[in-house]
Amino acid sequence: MKRVLQAPNLVLATLWSDQLRAAGFTASVQRAFASGIAGELPPDQCLPEVWVQDDAQCQPARELLAQWQRLPHRHWACPQCHEIVDGPFESCWNCGAPMPTSTWA
């Protein structure tokens, strides 16, 4: 078992762990409730951590999380409702229509 990263809070640790599991990694959150002992221990030692079961999965998991942090920024108009969509989204937030194959920056 090997630590992938330390998260700033339990919400992000859980989200990242769930995303890794959905991608096929055997991931878990450790120190989920250690924040209650911050002060008795240094605060940086009480943050939640994301771990993978197989040591060989650690580097690929780190790389995948890094890729997700660098998703492309898009700016496109929905072909159905004409709403402007910004960010890495592939569907319209307003009507749910998929992003057209040709987008504009």
Image (cartoon, rainbow, N blue to C red):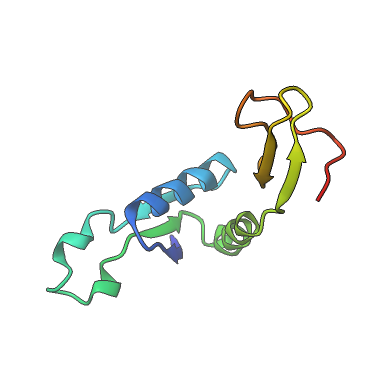
Q: On the rendered structure, is 15 left or right of 105?
A: left
Q: On the rendered structure, is 11 left or right of 71?
A: left
Q: Quick check: 68 above or below 42?
A: above
Q: What residue is at 16 percent from the left and 60 percent from the top?
A: 36
- What x and y, as percent, mark residue 76? 76, 41
Q: On the rendered structure, is 44 left or right of 72?
A: left
Q: Quick check: 6 above or below 19?
A: below
- What x and y, as percent, mark residue 68? 62, 54
Q: Quadrant of the N terminus?
A: bottom left
- What x and y, as percent, mark residue 60? 62, 59
Q: Which residue lies most toward the bottom here?
A: 42
Q: Which residue is more in the foreground, 73 or 8? A: 73
- What x and y, as percent, mark residue 104? 83, 46
Q: Which residue lies most toward the left here?
A: 40
Q: What residue is at 58 percent from the left and 43 percent from the top?
A: 24
Q: What residue is at 28 percent from the left and 54 percent from the top?
A: 32
Q: Quick check: 37 above or below 13?
A: below
Q: Which residue is more in the foreground, 51 or 83? A: 83
Q: Which residue is more in the foreground, 30 or 87? A: 87
Q: On the rendered structure, is 24 left or right of 48?
A: right
Q: What residue is at 52 percent from the left and 45 percent from the top?
A: 19
Q: How many marks?
A: 0
Would you identify the image quadrant in which residue 35 lies?
Answer: bottom left
